[in-house]
Amino acid sequence: MAKIVKPLTDPQCSSAKPKEKDYNLFDGSGLILLIRTSGTKTWRYRYKNALGTQIITIGTYPAIRLAKAREYRSKYQSMLSNNLDPKEQLIIEQSKQDNRYHFEPIARAWHVAYKSSGKWGEETAERALKNLEKYVFPIIGTRPIDSIKPKDLNLVLSEIEETGFLEVVKKTRQRFVSIFAYAISKGLIELK
């Protein structure tokens, strides 16, 4: 049976003092105020997906008051009820800074989504991300995804091929297909 949590009050949040160890104050439904030994108070949202427990840092108190933290919680709960992973959605939102979607944040969002699908083990997921960080992001990571042409992808693949890691070339080619399909499915690239 789930533990019943009494919602926090503003006075509880403001009067919470640091202790010898970090500790949490729970507002319920995943919203937590972490009190650090330094005295910093950080809002966090905890939820579960296929990978287990996930935590999103919302921001610090008192910059973000209790009511605002609850708005964030509601937003994340709404995402979850629509089968959207909040972490994945935050990565996509961050890539909208200049109204163009850059390759690296989209690839990272794809990685989160693919990893949570259960098709990868932890080691494979980690290796896939490291390969993207080492070989792909330095070349096309900051480019808007809709400006990347096949010749750009071939340049990345030929750079990897020169290292002699032919299996990495094959996997990267497959991941390009999957990343672009993901971007299209999320409406981040328009088909012409």
Image (cartoon, rainbow, N blue to C red):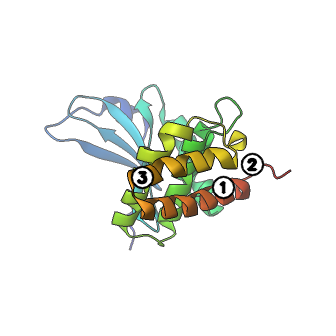
Residue farthest along the left direction in this orientation: 20
Q: Which residue is mark 2?
A: 189
Marked residue nearer the N-terminal end (2 or 1): 1
Residue 52 drawn at (x, y percent): 40, 65
CA gap, disc 2 and disc 1: 8 Å
**Whether label 3 touches label 2, CB < 8 Å:** no
- Residue at position x 32%, y 41% from top? 34
Amino acid under disc 2: Ile
8 vs 37, left or right, is right
Q: Which residue is mark 3?
A: 131
Decide which of 50, 134 is in the foreground and name it.
134
**Whether label 3 touches label 1, CB < 8 Å:** no
* Quarter in which the N terminus is drawn: bottom left
Decide which of 115, 47 is in the foreground and name it.
115
Marked residue nearer the N-terminal end (3 or 2): 3
Amino acid under disc 1: Phe
Give the label on residue 180, or none. Answer: 1
**Whether label 2 touches label 1, CB < 8 Å:** yes
Query: Element type at marker 3?
Result: helix
Residue 63 drawn at (x, y percent): 46, 25
